[in-house]
Image (tube, rainbow, N blue to C red):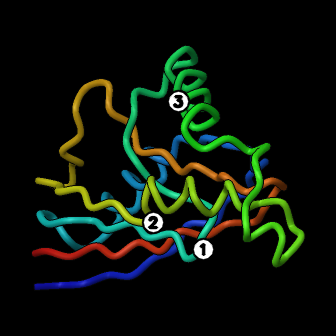
Amino acid sequence: MMVENKELSLQTEGSCDITDITPLVKRNVETSGINNGTITLFVPGSTAGLTTIEYETGLLRDFQDMWNRIIPQNIPYEHNKAWGDGNGHSHMRASMLGPSLTIPFINKKLSLGTWQQIVFVDFDNRPRARRIVLQIMGE
């Protein structure tokens, strides 16, 4: 069993900014010394998350609209009262989406479906410099 640790850096716009990171993840698997295994992605932060989705304009808009419906920005949050930074909704959204994702790969090829891309979602209320920790494990 081998383990390789890597990191991605992103500049995001915030406000449910969705970034397709599939090509970056593929490149890291392809350049690793591991042929078969899993890659785990992790966001060190509490206002962003990871998932897979079909990276298509209409669906991306639907995804953003869904978050506005289930966790609206313009309602009172105790976090905002305590810190005054106005991003209580960002923390709630990120906690529901989750900070990590694990994907198997075989012969250095991610086991994603035809219309499935890996996306980073920044829920914060301002642009941010973000990082994603990658851990590639296998043989």
Marked residue nearer the N-terminal end (2 or 1): 1
Of residues 46 and 77, the one drawn nearer to the viewer in this rendering: 77
Of residues 86 and 36, the one drawn nearer to the viewer in this rendering: 86
Badge 1: residue crowd in 10 Å (few <14, some 14–19, many ≥20): few
Mark 2 and mark 1 in contact? Answer it, CB < 8 Å: yes
- Judging by the rendered image, the residue that carries numbered circle 3 is 63
Looking at the image, which residue sits at the far top? 58
Name the amino acid type tagged 2.
Pro
- Judging by the rendered image, the residue that carries numbered circle 1 is 45
Q: Residue at x 56, y 53 (%)?
A: 93
Of residues 60 and 129, the one drawn nearer to the viewer in this rendering: 60
Badge 3: residue crowd in 10 Å (few <14, some 14–19, many ≥20): some
Distance from disc 2 to disc 1, alpha carbons, whole Å, reads 8 Å
Distance from disc 3 to disc 2, alpha carbons, whole Å, reads 17 Å
**Circle 2 sits in a helix, a strand or a loop, which is it?**
loop
- Give the x, y percent position of residue 49: 51, 58
Name the amino acid type tagged 3.
Phe
